[in-house]
């Protein structure tokens, strides 16, 4: 698959997906969102891939938002279709069975903050900035931001940020729990890889079940506690479980196969 607006590479079991429109601060136009969807589907399917890093090209922006130039004349139906498309793709990021880390290297505004929040974790550079400034455009977030921001930082602070359009610096994002870590720019990818390598040493099936079960908490149709009971039980049917427990009993390192 060749991409126009993103870069896709796989090295040492880690897939790096880079939004590559630096002259537009990596703003997400429709084609780019579609390519993100294709890239995540490819990474999900590829057995060589065990973890994913999502980042933006250049040093200034992760993603400065949805591409404002593309929707300035939209009507009701077009607005809803734009939002639905974004929801579908961002949901596929959130539900990816492999760990996904957003490497936030600058502005993560609007749709950029929303895409970072759809990832399982966020590592930010010291110059990163997070915010949902849609209200300034007479809009609300349309790619899940009204839902995921309160999940991550709590309702009161989310309400404030959504209504004021205030922008958080990296340290404040970290204090609020939006960023897992803040690191100097030259250590960003290294930190993401360090986290992924720790996860990749664990049982892949259990990691996938963690994504599935934690996300069930936020589902409207599922009860997370019920899902946990079912998925906990399902873990007992896996080779990874047999290997993990056998390795513990025999005081050796587990060699998981993801089956
Ligand atoms: N959509 C479309 N284009 C965007 C964009 C967006 N969300 N964000 C930045 N760009 C473009 C600019 O139009 C500019 O393009 P140009 O050189 O062809 O004029 C280029 O990226 C560089 O941006 P610029 O505004 O010149 O950089 P800056 O350093 O002065 O400001 C920001 C950076 C992030 C503060 C500013 O670009 C901004 O406010 N962007 C919009 C943020 C936003 O509202 N996002 C939510 C959208 S729903």
Image (cartoon, rainbow, N blue to C red):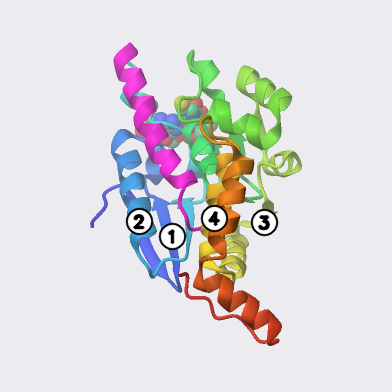
Instruction: Find out whether residue 92 is within the magenta segment.
Output: yes
Residue 219 at what x, y percent from top left? 54, 34
Q: Which residues are magenta?
A: 75-101
Give the CA separation, mark 3 to mark 1. Answer: 18 Å
Q: Which residue does the numbered mark 1 point to in the structure image?
A: 16
**For the residues carrying marks 3 and 1, which lies nearer the camera in this image?**
1
Residue carrying label 4 = 209
In this picture, is 67 found above or below 96? above
Marks 2/4: CA distance?
A: 28 Å
Exactly how many numbered labels are in the figure?
4
In the picture, the disc for residue 7 is: 2
Q: Earlier in the sequence, mark 2 or mark 4?
A: 2
Q: Are marks 3 and 2 in contact (CB under 8 Å)?
A: no
Q: Nearer the viewer, residue 171 or 95?
A: 95
Sequence-wise, the earlier of marks 1 and 2 is 2
Dot placed on the residue nearer the N-terminal end, 4 or 3 = 3
Q: Could you say whether the residue bearing mark 2 is in a helix, strand or loop?
A: strand
Q: Which label belongs to residue 183?
A: 3
Q: Are marks 4 and 3 in contact (CB under 8 Å)?
A: no
Marks 2 and 4: which is nearer the front? 4
């Amino acid at each position: 698959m060749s991409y126009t607006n993103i870069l896709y590479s796989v090295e040492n079991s880690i897939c790096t997906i880079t939004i590559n429109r630096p002259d537009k601060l990596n703003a997400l136009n429709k084609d780019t969102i579609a390519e993100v969807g294709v890239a995540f589907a490819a990474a999900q399917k590829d057995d060589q891939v065990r973890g994913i890093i999502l980042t933006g090209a250049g040093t200034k922006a992760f993603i400065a938002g949805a591409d404002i130039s593309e929707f300035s004349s939209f009507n009701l139906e077009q607005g809803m279709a734009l939002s639905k498309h974004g929801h579908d793709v961002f949901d596929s990021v959130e539900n990816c069975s492999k760990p996904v880390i957003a490497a936030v290297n600058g502005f993560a505004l609007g749709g950029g903050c929303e895409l970072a929040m759809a990832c399982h974790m966020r590592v930010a550079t010291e110059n990163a900035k997070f915010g949902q400034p849609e209200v300034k455009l007479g809009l609300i977030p349309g790619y899940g931001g009204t839902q995921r921001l309160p999940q991550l930082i709590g309702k009161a602070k989310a309400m404030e940020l959504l209504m004021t359009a205030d922008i958080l610096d990296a340290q404040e994002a970290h204090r609020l729990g939006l960023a897992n870590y803040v690191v100097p720019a030259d250590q960003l990818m290294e930190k993401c890889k360090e986290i992924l390598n720790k996860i990749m040493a664990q049982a892949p099936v259990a990691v996938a079940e963690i994504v599935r079960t934690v996300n069930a908490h936020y589902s409207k149709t599922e009860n997370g506690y019920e899902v946990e009971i079912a998925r906990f039980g399902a873990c007992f049917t896996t080779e990874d479980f047999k290997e993990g427990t056998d390795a513990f009993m025999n005081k050796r390192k587990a060699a998981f196969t993801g089956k």
